[in-house]
Image (tube, grey):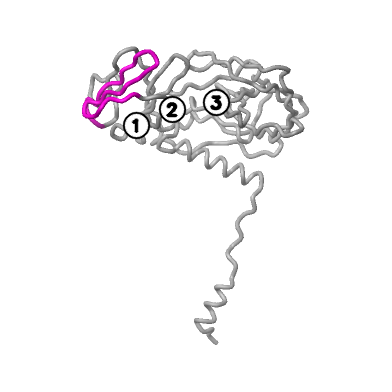
Amino acid sequence: MTIPVLVLGALLAQTPPPAKPRPTPILDTLEWRQNREKELLADRGWLAVSGLHWLKEGETTLGSGEGNEVRLGDGPLRWGVAARASRKVELRPVEEASREITPGDEPFWIGRTSVQLIQRADRIGLRLWDPRNARRLAFHGLRWYEVKPEYKVRGRLIPSPSPSTVKIASVIGQVIDYPSPGIVEFELYGRKLRLTPVYETDARDELFYIFKDATAAKTTYGAGRFVYSELPDRDGMVVLDFNRAYSPPCAYTDFATCPLPPAVNRLDLAIEAGELDPHPLR
């Protein structure tokens, strides 16, 4: 006996679609890790960064031809110059009108290269992104420790009695004062540990931890790692998830200005969670 086509179609229409996986802390972290990889691979992700040129006073030439101080992957042989006068920078293209640019401006394009002005204290430079950058083309994915629930811990913020800052050095030799709300104390494997978070941006809408542990230069990036947490709740509690600890931009490009872990954030305990050292991928 055969089932009429119309009846069969009606039966199939009533069949519910397969259920989607229910969100769990592990699935959420795996999705976060996938998004992290997508951000690295984006056209303006860290893997696409192809240069960082600190501008001197006066003119700096840009173009794809030999002899330019900022050499581009394609575009005009001589695009023009970036002229710096103290903290002001003016672009003077050969075929366009001159214009002033600031670090807050959107990037501009020369051929396939995206260019943006950045400022680090008294240093002003041009950062370049090229979607055909060698490290981006050679990238084959991130490596991680297995997600382990025990590395998602609750901590308590011990507020500073008065507004405080933490001096943090960077890979370009600068030392910058970051505002900090205090110290976060937590327990891991029966040990009480402390990390000092800072506010990374003026918005102060999350806590930023720059830390180094005993896995550094062994299984994780040698200069340390980053992790974030939400602001403390009304009881002063925060959640630190080291399964989402990740390598700083300097692990993927020589043209970043990464902050380094301050002495107070260097732990003698091995935190075997989060992102593994990406160097073997190069």
Left or right: where does residue 258 sit relative to residue 19?
Answer: left
Residue occupying the point 51% across, 22% down: 258
Residue 264: percent from left, percent from top = 66, 17
Q: Are marks 3 and 1 in contact (CB under 8 Å)?
A: no
The crowding category of the residue bearing disc 1, from other C-alpha atoms within 10 Å (few below 14, some 14 to 19, many at least 20), is: few
In this view of the protein, which residue sits in the foreground, 153 or 233? 233
In this view of the protein, which residue sits in the foreground, 278 or 235? 235
Task: Give the residue at mark 1.
Answer: 108
The crowding category of the residue bearing disc 2, from other C-alpha atoms within 10 Å (few below 14, some 14 to 19, many at least 20), is: few
Task: Give the residue at mark 2.
Answer: 104
Q: Is residue 181 magenta?
A: no
Range drawn in magenta: 75-100
The crowding category of the residue bearing disc 3, from other C-alpha atoms within 10 Å (few below 14, some 14 to 19, many at least 20), is: many
Mark 2 vs mark 3, foreground winner is 2
Left or right: where does residue 142 sit relative to residue 22?
Answer: left
Residue 200: percent from left, percent from top = 57, 25
C-alpha gap between disc 3 and disc 1: 32 Å
Task: Give the residue at mark 3.
Answer: 221
Residue type indicated by callout 1: Phe
Q: Earlier in the sequence, mark 3 or mark 1?
A: 1
